[in-house]
Image (cartoon, grey):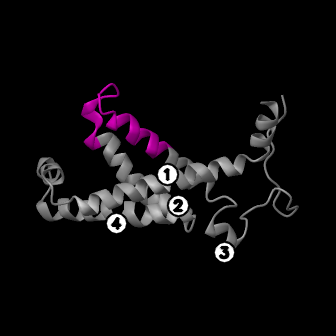
Amino acid sequence: MSKFIAWSEAHRGLWLDCVRIFLGLGLFARGVMLITHTSTGYYVNLLQQADAIWLLKSGVLHYVMLAHFLGGVLLTIGFFTRLAALVQIPILAGAVFLVHRQDGLFDANQALAFSTLVLFLLVVIAAAGAGKFSLDYATFGPARADDDPEHPSIALPQV
């Protein structure tokens, strides 16, 4: 067990890449689901319940579909990672603060808790960017490598 812990601590970037990939796949799947089920009553009712004009509601739904679909792909492959995460943040903030707020954290379907988790992870990915297992890293290189003397990393004091 201690060998696994030592290995996992030596490869922290890999874990963040795994979170980014999983989050991207989940958002992509949500985008596919939205695209293939927009004619169902759920989304029509959701649009009718919102207090906005129909064209705005339709535009928001199409923005969400495209952002989840394309943004999920970009997060999964790690290309324009920060931008892909930033585009998702207003959607999830709307889900947390407007759509699922009245459900509460202890609702049986847990939509508020899940949306809050996804929002938090998007903020983390937007701040951290892509890791070594990404097209960003392969295309643009490391933004700041730990062993680069020109750009030293900020070291936390050891306790």
Q: Which residue lies most toward the right here?
A: 149
Give the spatial CA distance, label 2 vs label 1.
7 Å
Q: Amino acid at mark 2?
A: Thr
Residue that numbered label 2 is attached to: 76
Q: Position of residue 56 (x, y in %)?
A: 19, 62
Q: Earlier in the sequence, mark 2 or mark 4?
A: 4
- Percent across and percent down for residue 113 are 39, 34
The mark found on residue 23 in the picture is 1
Q: Which is more N-terminal, label 1 or label 2?
A: 1
Residue 79 x/y as whole percent:
56, 68
Which quarter of the image is occupied by the N terminus?
Answer: top right
Q: Is residue 83 magenta?
A: no
**Magenta residue check for 108:** yes
Chain-order first, disc 1 or disc 4: 1
Mark 2 lies on a secondary structure that is: helix
Residue ID for mark 3? 139
Label tally: 4
- Please say if 27 is above or below 158: below
CA–CA distance in space, label 2 to label 4: 15 Å
Asked whether residue 126 appears in the rendered view, the answer is yes
Taken as a whole, is the magenta stretch helix, strand or loop? helix
- Name the residue tied to disc 4: 66
The three-letter code of the residue at mark 4 reads Leu
Q: Is residue 60 visible?
A: no
Horizontal side of residue 78 vs 51, given as left or right: right
At x 58%, y 64%, the residue is 78
81 lies above or below 111? below
Residues in magenta, as a range: 98-120
* Disc assigned to residue 45: none
Which tag, 3 or 1, sits closer to the chain's start?
Answer: 1
